[in-house]
Image (cartoon, rainbow, N blue to C red):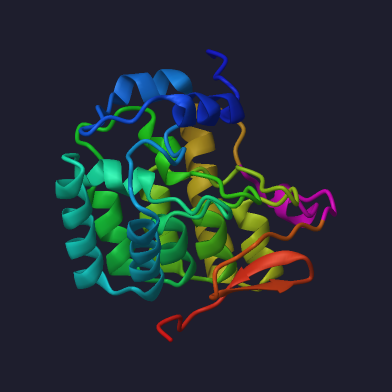
Amino acid sequence: MTQLPNLVSVKQHIIAAPLTENPQFNLQKIQDMGAATASGVMALTEDDVDDLIYFARAGELADLKEAIEGAAKSVNGSQFEVFISAVDPTSRNGMLHMAAANGHTETVKYLLSLLPSPRPPMDDRVVSSRNSSGNTPLHWASLNGHLPVVKLLFEAGADPTILNDAGHDAVYEAEINSKDDVVGYLLTEADAIEKASGATGVGESDVHEGRGNGTEVSENKPSDVEISNGDETPTEDVGT
């Protein structure tokens, strides 16, 4: 497997790059750099990012579509570019994190529809982007028990074996939060992939062993995320 550059160096490279009036987005260059979701790919304003993340978090799909379309036109870019560029600089949460955390199935479906077709390999990293605590959208959907969203993310290529900074994968987050339907789904799908490919996947033993290192983490979170026992617990009903 080709060694990908460190994300920090990639971010520094992007930040240091001069911005132009019409920034050129080069999908292959981003893939080669190993960063599909580093903010700075497009020169979105802070207000744009705040609005986009809020609409995704609240599940306000019509407003989100309008905001994405408007942002794309304002910088002469694509809606996909807006999708991967709207990332909170502190929490590293993007629109997909927030929509998934709050179970907004139609919003998640819309965001996933923005992925290019045919899909380049780097798109799996877009779907599995990690925030500042290492959590992916699948982590958050799983721990809240949003099975329809979990299915959408998994079918779009989200990796259930990624560990967050606490050493937990999505299956373990679902298991410790008593989301048995999510645990069952992810284990069944992972086992099916393992049998088909002969590769090692997520198994029952991973869940029962805890799949964690006991490390507690916290981060600066938007208003719909609380701390519970040191771990992130995104909550629902964030329209207020």
The location of residue 6, given as percent across then percent down, is 60, 24
Q: Main secondary structure of the magenta part?
A: loop
The residue range painted magenta reads 202-215
The location of residue 90, given as percent across then percent down, is 58, 53
- Residue 211 position (above or below residue 193): below
Does 172 sit left or right of 36 as displayed? right
Does 180 sit left or right of 78 as displayed? right
The location of residue 128, given as percent across then percent down, is 48, 44
- Residue 215 position (above or below residue 28): below
**Residue located 79% across and 70% down the image:** 229
- Residue 163 lies in what quarter of the image? top right
Quadrant containing the N terminus in the rendered view: top right
Quadrant containing the C terminus in the rendered view: bottom left
**Residue located 40% across and 63% down the image:** 50
* Number of residue marks: 0
**Magenta span has 205?**
yes
**Magenta span has 180?**
no
Viewer-side residue, 90 vs 139: 90
- Residue 18 position (above or below residue 157): above
Viewer-side residue, 53 vs 50: 50
> Furthest-top residue in view?
2
**Residue located 45% across and 67% down the image:** 147
- Residue 161 lies in what quarter of the image? top right
- Residue 222 lies in what quarter of the image? bottom right
**Residue located 26% across and 43% down the image:** 80
Does 50 sit left or right of 67 as displayed? right
The location of residue 178, given as percent across then percent down, is 65, 73
> Furthest-right residue in view?
214
